[in-house]
Amino acid sequence: MPNVVKIDKWNPDPAIIERAASVLKEGGLVAFPTETVYGLGADGLRAEAVRKIYAAKGRPQDNPLILHFSAPQETARIAKSSRRALDLMEEFWPGPLTLVLPLLDGSRVPKEVTAGLSTVAIRMPAHPVALALIEATGRPLAAPSANRSGRPSPTDARAVAEDLGRFADMILDAGGVDIGLESTVIDLTGEDVLLLRPGGLPAETIAAFLGSPLRTPGASDSPASKRSPGVRYRHYAPDIDVLIWDKKDALFMSGVDPALSGFVGLTKPPVSFARSIIFDSPESYARGLFASFREMESDGACRRIVAEWPEAEGIGLALRDRIKRAAAR
């Protein structure tokens, strides 16, 4: 992996950061770690650089990107922030929360970032390497997950190299990520706060701060779903089938041959599988879900993966979302 550069998470080498920033300033692509997953970064204000992201990932052109900032005040030139948005930034940034806001008139954000919409998705990642890189580049970075579109998101540099090694000009390797699932995305463009994508920050935590529940978009909000990445296409899927198992079911799944299947979840399954990965908490399940998918698809003994359906609370809601989309046909 010649384009992979090791970097210390807590004390990023300034020389390495400057090298990576130079690549971005020249219109190149740099994969870097965040607290959620690894992202594939480009200068978010440079259309030709952003187009390279779509080409590398094989990403649909109507799937918008998230702009990453190193400080809340930097968003003022990009998005129209309400008092509510500023309060959320102060409380939860840096962290795994993405805000969808109206695009500021006259902003320099190319349509390739917004998919031609009048809204923009923004966040500030909680990772020293990511923050140092954004600051050194001096521009917001467009950075979706650093994987081929539809594949399990990468939670370490090896997964990035497997999917995008020939596309990324540089991959910053700071080890595994902390959360393992993408950021929570909420829409603040209307009176109600819409939960577009559950993620690393639990919806209950946001609702408690706001003093009111988040609303899931309904039929009347259908355009809102287009404002968030990761919600309209099959995502997070390995090359072998993923099946969902709810431990509340009285009987185990019919038609599943455990000898040819892998299992991931929180509960020891009632039958023996070719391979089982049992996590000790919903948080560790989230952190290891995508890596488990990748491990099992490369294991010749597994022709499918059975994933346990977690409780729909805390990080479990985001886990359900990722498992459901990975299992979609």
Image (tube, rainbow, N blue to C red):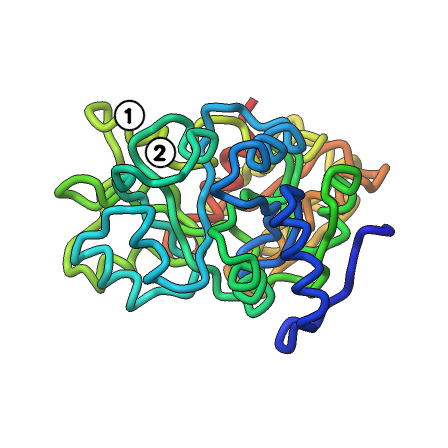
Q: Is residue 6 above or below residue 63?
A: below
Residue closer to the observer: 213 or 162: 162
For mark 1, what is the residue? 223
Residue 15 in percent (x, y) is at: 71, 69
Residue type at numbered disc 1: Pro
Residue 312 in percent (x, y) is at: 38, 50
Residue type at numbered disc 2: Arg
When asked about the image quadrant of residue 151, the answer is: top right
Residue 147 in percent (x, y) is at: 65, 40
Q: Looking at the figure, which quarter contains the C terminus? A: top right
Farthest residue, direction left: 191
Left or right of residue 309, residue 269 in this image: right
When asked about the image quadrant of residue 244, the answer is: top right
Q: Is residue 238 above or below residue 274?
A: above
Residue closer to the observer: 321 or 223: 223
The residue carrying pointer 2 sits among few (fewer than 14), some (14 to 19) or many (20 or more) residues within 10 Å by Cα, namely many
Left or right of residue 4, residue 33 in this image: left
Marks 1/2 in contact by CB < 8 Å: the verdict is yes
For mark 2, what is the residue? 227
At a point 56% along the width and 67% down the height, the residue shown is 132
For the question of whether residue 250 can be seen, the reply is: no
For the question of whether residue 201 can be seen, the reply is: yes
Residue closer to the observer: 293 or 108: 108
The residue carrying pointer 1 sits among few (fewer than 14), some (14 to 19) or many (20 or more) residues within 10 Å by Cα, namely few
Q: CA distance from mark 1 to mark 2?
A: 7 Å
